[in-house]
Image: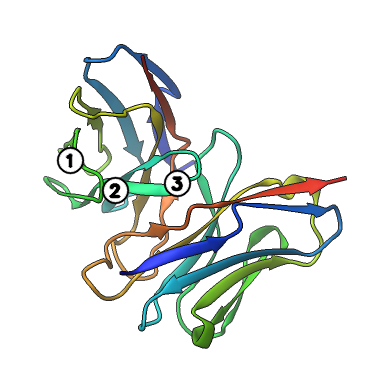
Amino acid sequence: AQSVTQLGSHVSVSEGALVLLRCNYSSSVPPYLFWYVQYPNQGLQLLLKYTTGATLVKGINGFEAEFKKSETSFHLTKPSAHMSDAAEYFCAVRFTTGGSNYKLTFGKGTLLTVNP
Amino acid sequence: DGGITQSPKYLFRKEGQNVTLSCEQNLNHDAMYWYRQDPGQGLRLIYYSQIVNDFQKGDIAEGYSVSREKKESFPLTVTSAQKNPTAFYLCASSIGGTGNSPLHFGNGTRLTVT
């Protein structure tokens, strides 16, 4: 079955430290990949998306993600965490096979805490 | 400013009552979606619509109903048949319903049923 897995429901980093949020998907055909951020009691905001072409994608707020086909991964990184980065992050995938190309399938989310 | 408006932000209902959540968009998007969010479970698709007067069930449609009479509007009704209706409901839209089109989200409606 096609699925999206985010490793770690909760990640805690110090301000200024590297942020690494992990996302893996299960599909033999590369899908379309997205990262969203959600602040408390708000909707989701698009951080970045991968479609085709360059495997390193830059997004808003200094975030970037690298698509690795061999590892079926799309991990999100930021070199230096800021207090304002504290939020929940969701990896989302639009699979291109199996009749699922109409929807985004979301991971369960990773809550990022940034410590001063 | 273009965007998606969900109303109300908070909604309280008694068990056994139907309730309708509003979603309006002025982005001129063809596709609209309803997702349900529960703590630790990510987002799960309830219904989606790719054009006016047409909609399809998502992964958890039981106990919900929708309509799409206008391009701008996609209201969701939570019926008394929904066993666990208390949740955060998110409406979204996209230019196209497939490919690399990202979803744009409203700010959600938090429904509490007691």
Q: Residue at x 84, y 61 (%)?
A: A17
The chain that hosts pointer 3 is: B
Q: Nearer the viewer, residue B34 or A11?
A: A11
Decide which of tag 1 and tag 2 comes sooner along the chain: 2
Spot occupied by residue B94 in the image (x, y as percentages of width and height)? 35, 55
Query: Disc 3 on helix, strand or loop?
Result: loop
Q: CA distance from mark 3 to mark 2?
A: 21 Å
Instruction: Say few, some or many: other residues with alpha carbon within 10 Å of mark 3 (under 14 / 14 to 19 / 20 or more).
Output: few
Q: Which residue is mark 2?
A: B32
Q: Which residue is mark 1?
A: B68
State yes or no: discs 3 and 1 in contact (Cβ < 8 Å): no
Query: Disc 2 on helix, strand or loop?
Result: strand
Spot occupied by residue A114 in the image (x, y as percentages of width and height)? 78, 48
Q: Amino acid at mark 2?
A: Met
Q: Residue at x 36, y 14 (%)?
A: B114
Left or right: where B18 falls relative to A66:
left
Residue A88 higher or lower than B107, as above or below: below
Q: Residue at x 26, y 37 (%)?
A: B73
Q: CA distance from mark 1 to mark 2?
A: 9 Å
Residue B41: mark: 3
Q: Amino acid at mark 1?
A: Arg
